[in-house]
Amino acid sequence: TQLLEQSPQFLSIQEGENLTVYCNSSSVFSSLQWYRQEPGEGPVLLVTVVTGGEVKKLKRLTFQFGDARKDSSLHITAAQPGDTGLYLCAGYNNNDMRFGAGTRLTVKP
Amino acid sequence: ETGVTQTPRHLVMGMTNKKSLKCEQHLGHNAMYWYKQSAKKPLELMFVYNFKEQTENNSVPSRFSPECPNSSHLFLHLHTLQPEDSALYLCASSQDLAGWYNEQFFGPGTRLTVL
């Protein structure tokens, strides 16, 4: 079973602060995805990482895939209220995709 | 708007009812998926269809019955559900199974409550 553990489970910060959320597993994944889900909506893909050590940037969001392809992090710089949502990671390997339970982020104005 | 629509958005049903969830994708994709999202639990993959053929059934109870009449439509037929089946049911699609790990598009989900 490829379990993905996300931490922290909940995070509440003020606008302008920086934050990092984590996605960890004991399993190796051939690719890993990050999604954001807003209330009443389905998850929306933010990024896919496939190479160990890979770093991708999406405006104020920086995603990193661990060297061993077992873990990943998402760093947000100068968080804004619009970043509020549930952040999910999902690992894919051998025709199987597993999701973490998510980090619920609240950014207060 | 992701190009994947789901109806109804909310559904309340008794344990003896029979109902169906509908998913439609307007993206020309060939693979479609059903997921279950319960509070504080990871998304659970339920069913996978590729070119209308079911390729995966993740030990889902038989009270959930999927149907894929064509590559654009996916149904989930529900009967004799239990209260613990209350959850958000999400449909997703991707270009094909090879595209699953690259990008999948989710619908907004159906919030199901079983009384």
Image: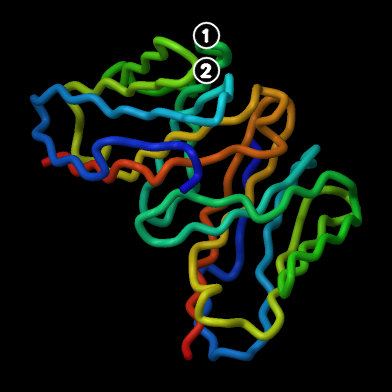
Relative side of A31 to A68, left or right: left
The answer to whether residue A59 is above or below residue B113 is below
Q: Secondary structure at mark 1?
A: strand
The residue pinned by badge 1 equals B53
Which quarter shows the N terminus of chain A? top right
Q: Secondary structure at mark 2?
A: strand
The answer to whether residue B70 is above or below residue A24 is above
Q: Chain of mark 2?
A: B
**Amino acid residing under circle 1:** Glu
| Disc assigned to residue B19 | none
Relative side of B40 to B31, left or right: left
Query: Contact, CB < 8 Å: mark 2 with mark 1?
Result: yes
| Residue A39 percent coordinates (x, y) | 38, 61
Residue at 28% in and 29% down: B21
* Distance in Å between CA atoms under marks 2 and 1: 5 Å
Residue at 47% in and 87% down: A108
Q: How many marks?
A: 2
| Disc assigned to residue B49 | 2
Q: Residues within 10 Å of mark 1 (few under 14, many from 20)?
A: some
The answer to whether residue B53 is above or below residue A103 is above
**Amino acid residing under circle 2:** Tyr
